Image (cartoon, rainbow, N blue to C red):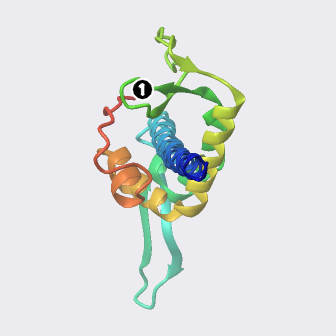
Amino acid sequence: MENHFYIVIVYTLMSLHVLLVQGARQGQDVKCGACRALVDEMDWAISQIDPKKRIQTGSFRIDPDGSQSVREVPFSRSESHLLELMKEVCERMNDYGERVECATDRKTYERHASRDGTAMDLSDVTFDSRVSSSLKFACETIVEQHEDELIEFFAHETDNVKDKLCSKRTDLCDHDLKIPHDEL
């Protein structure tokens, strides 16, 4: 009788451990998915601005030598524009659904509405308020905790921002996770 009791306890503890590990990984999947979706949405919004549009930044004070430290930068990558985009980017998480990879049981997140009207295969993508709210919360947390990194990357970087920001800089995605590079 005692052995049976211990076996049940050990089995229960092992089951709890598995659930905790899966829950942690799923939480990591949501954070990673939100980061990658945030990058997609920011990249797309930046690409919609006329590249010729410029804005003056810097100090408008006149230095003792009579000069000003004002410079022109592309509006699409200016700090003020990026801050505006970050205020609304997490609302777009409602446009994402969840796909579970059969082989790895990992979750990925995909837009369920194309921006250009092309048909998309969404047969194995789940859309529900639980997915949207989890992604939105994760996105808001990322924006709050990594605002400086987001501005830094989007103001200057144009190549592999998802990998550089989501994996290397913030550790929101596994470094060794093989996620395909998406195109806009």
- Name the residue furthest bottom: 64
Q: Position of residue 107 (x, y in %)?
A: 48, 33
Q: Is residue 113 visible?
A: no
Quadrant assignment, res 66:
bottom left
User: Quick one: SS at disc 1?
Assistant: loop
Q: Position of residue 79 (x, y in %)?
A: 52, 59
Residue nearest the viewer, comparing 103 with 60? 103
In the picture, measured across the screen, residue 95 lies left or right of residue 78, that is right
Q: Position of residue 184 (x, y in %)?
A: 40, 29
Image point 42% across, 61% down: which residue?
152
Question: Can you say whether 166 is above or below 132 in the image?
Answer: below
Image point 61% across, 48% down: which residue?
1
Q: Position of residue 48 (x, y in %)?
A: 49, 33
Residue nearest the viewer, comparing 123 with 94? 123
Quadrant assignment, res 136:
top right
Question: Can you say whether 120 is above or below 16 in the image?
Answer: above
Q: Is residue 144 visible?
A: yes
Q: Residues within 10 Å of mark 1 (few under 14, many from 20)?
A: few
- Residue for badge 1: 101
Residue nearest the viewer, comparing 74 with 89? 89
Question: Can you say whether 124 is above or below 132 in the image?
Answer: above
